[in-house]
């Protein structure tokens, strides 16, 4: 008599994969923020629209997911962190007013800044100079993650700011 085959072992439960953000990058762990709608004004984003990226900085969820992916790529290439170099990210309307008063002619008109949408970062650590190594690295790599030093901020732009980088969401 032939022995019956052993019962099949149950298949292991699949580990749920994180839902990709609109950028295609994994969402920020522990953050369930949503992209603000048309009913939210520049500089009025709340915790429900912002994800922390570390070092006390916040961005809207798609920008945060992309920036964390950019940081991971930078760490893999250099062994150093990019997040620690961020000097400014989301700015409330009140913070935009403060910056405009402290830096007349340099800061955007309050209520118009990409910082007020959680879509911009200012970066130090050598990115505050067009000749800096970090600026060169960002210039070579950030676009692959949806980040750019906009034309107005580039060398020869209307307000050169090598430290200012903006995320352009895919539509």
Image: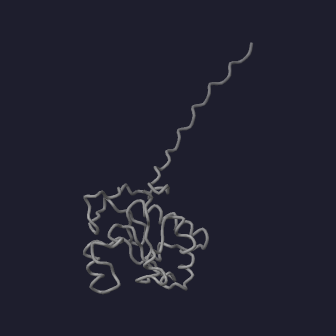
- Vertical relation: 135 (above or below) 47: below
Task: Look at 39% across and 76% down and name the residue there.
Answer: 88
Task: Look at 56% across and 70% down and name the residue there.
Answer: 141
Question: What scheme was used to colour the molecule?
Answer: one colour
Location of residue 169 (image quadrant): bottom left
- Vertical relation: 19 (above or below) 2: below
- Vertical relation: 38 (above or below) 150: above
Location of residue 94 (image quadrant): bottom left
Task: Look at 33% across and 81% down and name the residue there.
Answer: 107
Quadrant containing the N terminus is: top right
Across and down, in percent, residue 84 comes to: 47, 75
Task: Look at 34% across and 67% down and name the residue there.
Answer: 117
Across and down, in percent, residue 22 comes to: 44, 54
Across and down, in percent, residue 116 comes to: 32, 70
* Nearer to the camera, 64 or 31: 64
The residue most toward the top is 1
Location of residue 133 (image quadrant): bottom right
* Nearer to the camera, 139 or 34: 139
Quadrant containing the C terminus is: bottom left
Across and down, in percent, residue 134 comes to: 54, 79
């Amino acid at each position: 008599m032939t022995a019956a085959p052993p019962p099949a072992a149950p298949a292991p439960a699949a580990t749920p994969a994180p839902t990709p953000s609109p950028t295609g990058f994994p969402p920020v762990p522990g953050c369930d923020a949503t992209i603000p709608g048309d009913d939210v004004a520049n500089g009025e984003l709340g915790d429900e629209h912002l994800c922390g990226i570390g070092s006390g900085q916040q961005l809207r969820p798609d920008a945060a997911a992309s920036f964390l992916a950019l940081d991971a790529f930078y760490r893999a290439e250099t062994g150093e962190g990019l997040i620690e170099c961020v000097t400014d990210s989301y700015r409330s309307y009140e913070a935009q007013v403060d910056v405009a008063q402290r830096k007349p002619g340099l800061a955007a008109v309050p209520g118009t800044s990409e910082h007020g949408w959680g879509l911009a970062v200012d970066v130090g650590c050598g990115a505050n100079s067009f000749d800096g190594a970090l600026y060169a690295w960002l210039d070579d790599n950030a676009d692959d993650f949806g980040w750019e030093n906009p034309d107005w901020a580039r060398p020869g732009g209307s307000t050169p700011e090598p430290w200012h980088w903006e995320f352009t969401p895919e539509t």
